[in-house]
Image: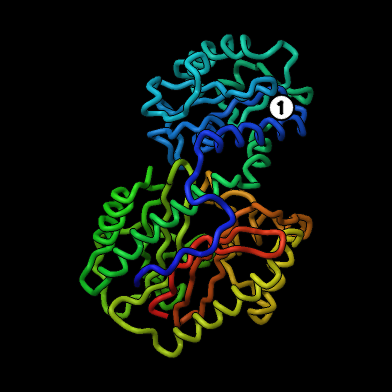
C-alpha cells in the first residue's frame, strides 16, 4: 500500500517520558482532589502503567494474577508507590525512587491482603478515604476501607477522569505507536494474496512491529474473512455479526473480504487500526459503493466533531448520513477513546445509552477512534477505523494510512 506522509501535529516529535509520567500523576491527583479521595489502590494492569510509568512486562488486557503489579497513589505525595515482584528498574523503566518500589502485593489472596494492608496503613491515615479500582474477594473479606455506605470507593472513576485529556508527550507516544503500526500493516498488505494463511499475516505483523520498536502486541491480530450474510456466519446470541473472531491457519482465497483489526503498545500507549481488504482482487461496483457510503458517514461525523460537541451530535450526524439507521454494530459503538487502553472513555453510541450521549461533551485533547460499519446482508460490507485528536476548532488526524484497494 505504501505509507503516506505523516499528518500535521501539535505535539513534540519525540516524547519526554519523565515529563509524561509527572504530568500523569498530576492529573491523577487533581482527579483525586476533585472526587475527595486521599489515596487510590490500583491493580488493573493499564491503570498501574498509567500511574507509575512502569512498562510492565506482563501487561495486557487480562488479569495476570500472580505477576500483576499494584500501585498506590497518595494525594499528598507527588511520587506513586509500586508493589511488584520485579525490582529492577532497567526492566520496569519507571524512574521511581527505591523507597517507592516495594515487594509484590497479591490482592486476590487472603494472605496477600493480610500482608498488604499493614503496608498501606503506613502510607495513609486511619481516617483516609481510599479507593480501589478492583475490589477482590479477599479485600471484601478483610472488610477494610469501606466507605460510609458500606461499599468500596471506585478508583476507576478517578483514573478514567485523569486519562481523558492526553498530554503532549502521550500524543507523541501514540503517534509513534501508530507509525510502527503503519509499518507493520504495510508489510502485511504487501503479502496479502490467495493461499496465504491468516497466521502467516500475524507472523509478518508481529515480526515487523517488534523490529520497529513496539513494546507489546495488545490484540490477537484479526484478519477476519467476512461472510456475505449473517446467516452464513457463526451464530451469536445477539443475532448480529460475529466480530471479531480469532485468526486461524485458514488459507485465504481470491475475493475474500477481510476485516482487519489490530493494536500494539508503545511506551504503554495503545494503538488501533481497522481496514477492509479484498484478497487478490479489486473492489467490484457494489463494494466500491459500500466504501463510498462509509466515507460519507465518516465525513458527516467529522464535520460536527470538535471540542464542545456532544456525543449525540456525532451519532445524529452518522445516522442521518446513513438514511436514518445506525451505521455501527449494536454490540460495539460508533467511536471510542484510545490511550493507555485500546478502548476507553469517551464511548460514543455505546450501550451506555442515548441519555449518556446527549450529556457527554467532548474536550480538546481527547483521542477518538471512529469506526462506522456498512453492512448489506447478502453482499457483505465495509468497516474501517479512523484515529483522531479532538481540538478546539475541530479535529486532527493521527494516522493517514490509505484505504487501498478502495
Instruction: Answer few, some or many: residues within 10 Å of disc 1's Cα (few below 14, many 20 plus, some between 14 and 19).
Output: few
Q: Quadrant of the C terminus?
A: bottom left
Percent of width and height locating residue 160? 64, 41
Residue 335 can be seen, yes or no: yes
Residue at image coords 71%, 30%: 32
In the image, residue 385 above or below residue 42: below
**So how many labels did they put on this image?**
1
Residue at image coords 50%, 37%: 17
Q: Quick one: 83 or 17, which is closer to the camera?
A: 17
In the image, residue 5 above or below residue 353: below
Residue at image coords 54%, 44%: 169
Percent of width and height locating residue 171? 55, 50
In the image, residue 48 above or below residue 121: below
| Residue wearing tag 1 | 151
Percent of width and height locating residue 99? 51, 13
Please state if 33 lies on the left or on the right of 139 as rendered.
right
The answer to which quarter of the image holds residue 247 is: bottom left
Under circle 1, the secondary element is loop
The answer to which quarter of the image holds residue 9 is: bottom right
Residue at image coords 61%, 75%: 299
In the image, residue 22 above or below residue 297: above
Q: Quick one: 357 or 135, which is closer to the camera?
A: 357
Percent of width and height locating residue 117? 58, 13
Amino acid at each position: 500500500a505504501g505509507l503516506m506522509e505523516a499528518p500535521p501535529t501539535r505535539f513534540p516529535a519525540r516524547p519526554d517520558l519523565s515529563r509524561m509520567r509527572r504530568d500523569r500523576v498530576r492529573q491523577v491527583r487533581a482527579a483525586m482532589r476533585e472526587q475527595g479521595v486521599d489515596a487510590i489502590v490500583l491493580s488493573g494492569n493499564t491503570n498501574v502503567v498509567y500511574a507509575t510509568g512502569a512498562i510492565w512486562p506482563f501487561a495486557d488486557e487480562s488479569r495476570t494474577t500472580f505477576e500483576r503489579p499494584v500501585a498506590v497513589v497518595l494525594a499528598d505525595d507527588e511520587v506513586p508507590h509500586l508493589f511488584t515482584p520485579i525490582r529492577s528498574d532497567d526492566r520496569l523503566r519507571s524512574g521511581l525512587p527505591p523507597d517507592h518500589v516495594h515487594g509484590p502485593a497479591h490482592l486476590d489472596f487472603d494472605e496477600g491482603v493480610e500482608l498488604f494492608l499493614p503496608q498501606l496503613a503506613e502510607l495513609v491515615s486511619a481516617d483516609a478515604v481510599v479507593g480501589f479500582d478492583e475490589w477482590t474477594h479477599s479485600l471484601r473479606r478483610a472488610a477494610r476501607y469501606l466507605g460510609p455506605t458500606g461499599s468500596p470507593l471506585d478508583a476507576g472513576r478517578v483514573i478514567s477522569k485523569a486519562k481523558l485529556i492526553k498530554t503532549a508527550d502521550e500524543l507523541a507516544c501514540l503517534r509513534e505507536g501508530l507509525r510502527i503500526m503503519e509499518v507493520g500493516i504495510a508489510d502485511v498488505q504487501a503479502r496479502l494474496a490467495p493461499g496465504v494463511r491468516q497466521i502467516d499475516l500475524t507472523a509478518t505483523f508481529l515480526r515487523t512491529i517488534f523490529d520497529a520498536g513496539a513494546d507489546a502486541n495488545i490484540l490477537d491480530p484479526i484478519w477476519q474473512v467476512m461472510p456475505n450474510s449473517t446467516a452464513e456466519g457463526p451464530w451469536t446470541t445477539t443475532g448480529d455479526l460475529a466480530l471479531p473472531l480469532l485468526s486461524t491457519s485458514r488459507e485465504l482465497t481470491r475475493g475474500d473480504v477481510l476485516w482487519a483489526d489490530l493494536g500494539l503498545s508503545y511506551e504503554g500507549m495503545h494503538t488501533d487500526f481497522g481496514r477492509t481488504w479484498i484478497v487478490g482482487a479489486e473492489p467490484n461496483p457494489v463494494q466500491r459503493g459500500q466504501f463510498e457510503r462509509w466515507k460519507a458517514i465518516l465525513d458527516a461525523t467529522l464535520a460536527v466533531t470538535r471540542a464542545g460537541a456532544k456525543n449525540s451530535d456525532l451519532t445524529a450526524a452518522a445516522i442521518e448520513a446513513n438514511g436514518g439507521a445506525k451505521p455501527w454494530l449494536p454490540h460495539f459503538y460508533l467511536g471510542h477513546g484510545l490511550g493507555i487502553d485500546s478502548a476507553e472513555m469517551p464511548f460514543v453510541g455505546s450501550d451506555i445509552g442515548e441519555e449518556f450521549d446527549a450529556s457527554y461533551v467532548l474536550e480538546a485533547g481527547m483521542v477518538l477512534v471512529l469506526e462506522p460499519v456498512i453492512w448489506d446482508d447478502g453482499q457483505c460490507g465495509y468497516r474501517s477505523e479512523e484515529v483522531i485528536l479532538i481540538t478546539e476548532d475541530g479535529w486532527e488526524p493521527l494516522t493517514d494510512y490509505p484505504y487501498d484497494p478502495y
